[in-house]
Amino acid sequence: MAENKMEKQLYESLNQSQQSLDDFAFAPYSEKEAERTGFSYYSYWGSTIRVFLKNRLATGLLILLVLLVLFTIIQPHLPNQFRATEVINHPITGLQMYNIGPSFSNVMYTVPENTQLVVTPYENDTWAAVSNILTSLKARTTFTIIEYEKNWVKVELDDGQHGYVLNNFTTKLRLPEDPNQVPYESRSNFPVKMYTFPEDYTNQGTELFVLKDQLNITPDGLSATTKTEAKLRLLPGDAPFLFGTNNAGQDMWSMVWSGTRTSLYIGFMVAMLEAIIGIFIGVLWGYVRRLDRLLTEIYNVINNIPTTIVLIMFTYIMRPGIQTLIFSMTITGWVSMARFVRNQIVIIRDRDYNLASRCLGSSTFRIITRNLLPYLVSVIMLRMALAIPGAIGSEVFITYIGLGLPVSIPSLGNLINVGRKLVTTSYAYQLIFPTIILSIVTISFYIIGNAFADAADPRNHV
Amino acid sequence: MLKYVGKRLLAALVTLFIILTTVFVLMRQMPIEGYFDNIDKADQGVIDAKLHQLGLKDPMHIQLLNFYKNILKGDLGVSNRYRTGAPIIDIIAGKAPISIQMGLISMALSLLLGIPLGAKMARSKYKFWDKIGTGFIVFINAVPAAVYYIYIQSYGSSMLKISMLFDPSKFLNWVLPVFSMSLGSIAYYAMWLRRYMVDELNKDYVQLAKAKGVTSQDITMAHVFRNAFVPMIQYIPSSLLFTISGSIYVESLYSIPGMGGLLVDVITRQDNTMVQALVMIYASIGIIGMLLGDLLMALIDPRISFAKKEGVR
């Protein structure tokens, strides 16, 4: 019974399929449809980018590098920036604002309400120059100490004026045997300053700046009290010295970015020129058989000259400047690029697809630009990515031996070169900031270059 | 083999001739102010006399001829400006030994440290030691040598309680300069050995050896390392010979009286005879180093042969 049922089912399904087979019809021949076989969604550059993006570190560094390059370009146009080589002077004394440490704002002190300050005349509508220095005493002026307070002493002058004088190794006051004896007639061998209260609200003796709105200035315009809590700033305006200033009073922040711009420009230019010359000569060398012998001999000569000699010679003979550096680095760098391209071309030159292409009558130019060079794009880009930090490093080296850019053109090389003399002092920030930027640029190019080389290798494409 | 070496040496002579002539001509293009400390105060007679004495008044080809005549006699001449009147041979003989000693020690150190590091990194690819080593290599490549040398000098000398300046008689004073000089090449050797070894490890013969049951220790030492070291051995003779040129950074930092800044010094002071002598020495070293490197490579790797003409494929 069960068998019968199965048989029945079988027959039914056979009948059905017979019926459905009848529904089919032969497809007409369509050239377009026939071509569809063998189609793949694989695209070389798409896969390269996909593999590259999988490398998180390299992607992150690429973004960082792009932002950094963009920032070096827009930095001079941002508000509150100093010009790169501008020497910043104190508006009243005209002294250079040198060796000011890095900080996020130019506020030196925040003073509470009702602070007594001394105003120095200064023509400005919104800013007032203030300090708390009552008078400056000449060297060997005598005064009477009437109170001791940590490293300050309260003194009285002969004319009855009261004030405070700093009491430490910088003032070297004459002090009594008994440390608490008052009154005591004292003097200093140095010129000293007398302050209104035991606190130094100056920048090494020069005036600070505060908004006029925050002050109650007395009618004679010589003293003032603060209306509210007030910020005493290094300069009128609120542009900070983010990276401090150097010993010439130049803003390190704009110097570093201007230097980065110069160094990156040198790096990009050298890499570009090396690539252009290197590819042109490398292709000729690799593809044109008759030139192989000659170019190999020339290569042997050039390659045997130590690069340092050439670099030093050219930078010394020509006038120091960006063009000189680019020229001398290109002169020494294109050789290895040409050799590299030549080797690659020799490897792929006689592959079957090129042979076929030649048989079909492609011109040499077409074979080179369409068949050979696209094959080399990834390796050439890797070489260029590594040439940029190389050029920046050479620039540091040339500056070190004293043949680099003049100090009037900031570059990472001469910033580091100036900074390295300060390494053991408290001004080491003048070395550290340019070094950090240089390291970020170099590391990024190395890692991005290598990640890109991996990504461009079709064996890594899935 | 001998024929090959002969050919290479002949080509080397031609190369040397081209280099020397170029440098000779370039140096003669320099402004004459460079030959005097104070040209404004000297009168024309004195200037002419000095230029005549330096042989700069002769036509270029005569100067060149005299130069080559002297070289063939084995006479490098005397220094004009760097140490006026002193024979160049003496100056170099006084400076070279310390640079060579220091260079050899640091090279030995960097080979001893760099190669095990590179091998270790390749064997533990993407694991702990590889990451540590990569970090070190990236650091050394990224931070300019001029910067980390100073930190090594200032912190190292206060840690070892020695003076910052070099004194060849004290052992401790050798530590910091040698260490600074090796750091770069340790990173260099480790980086390339790792890359070559990783390349080798991916090859089919390693799979076969594994399938045969060879231990990974044996594979690394007997097969992978030997193959990976071949492309590196090419540069060893050059590095050995170039220890004579010293290190500009290290020698100026520690005031070591070596060859380091000599070339830069004599170029900027336009001491023509010294520049020519030094360029000749360095260029010959470069050429000989490369030749020795090629020969050494052929000696170690039997697959490389110079007898067969390297033709166009």
Image: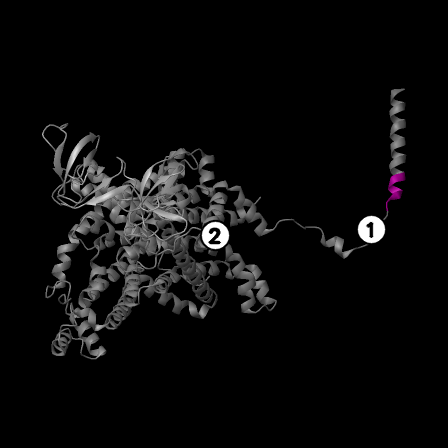
Residue sitting at 22 percent across and 30 percent down?
A150
Left or right: A17 as drawn, with respect to B271: right
Residues under labels 1 and 2: Cα distance? 58 Å
The crowd level at tag 1 (other Cα within 10 Å; few <14, some 14-19, many 20+) is: few
The crowd level at tag 2 (other Cα within 10 Å; few <14, some 14-19, many 20+) is: few
Percent x, y of residue A115: 34, 36
The three-letter amino acid code for the residue at tag 2 is Leu
Q: Is residue B280 visible?
A: no
Percent x, y of residue A52: 52, 46
Asked if residue A22 is among those painted magenta in the image, a careful observer would answer yes
Q: Is residue B200 visible?
A: yes
Say which of A285 and A128 sits in front: A128
Left or right: A436 as drawn, with respect to A364: left
Residue sitting at 44 percent across and 66 percent down?
A281
**Which residue does the numbered mark 1 point to in the structure image?**
A27
Question: Magenta part mainly helix, strand or loop?
Answer: helix
Q: The numbered mark 2 sits on a residue in which chain?
A: A
Q: The numbered mark 1 sits on a residue in which chain?
A: A
For residue A323, which numbered disc appears in the image? Answer: none
The three-letter amino acid code for the residue at tag 1 is Ala
Give the SS element for disc 2.
helix
**Which residue does the numbered mark 2 point to in the structure image?**
A70
Dots 1 and 2 on the same chain: yes
Left or right: A29 as drawn, with respect to A414: right
Give the SS element for disc 1.
loop
Q: Nearer the viewer, mark 1 or mark 2?
A: 2
Q: Which residues are magenta?
A: A19-24
> Which quarter of the picture shows residue B126?
top left
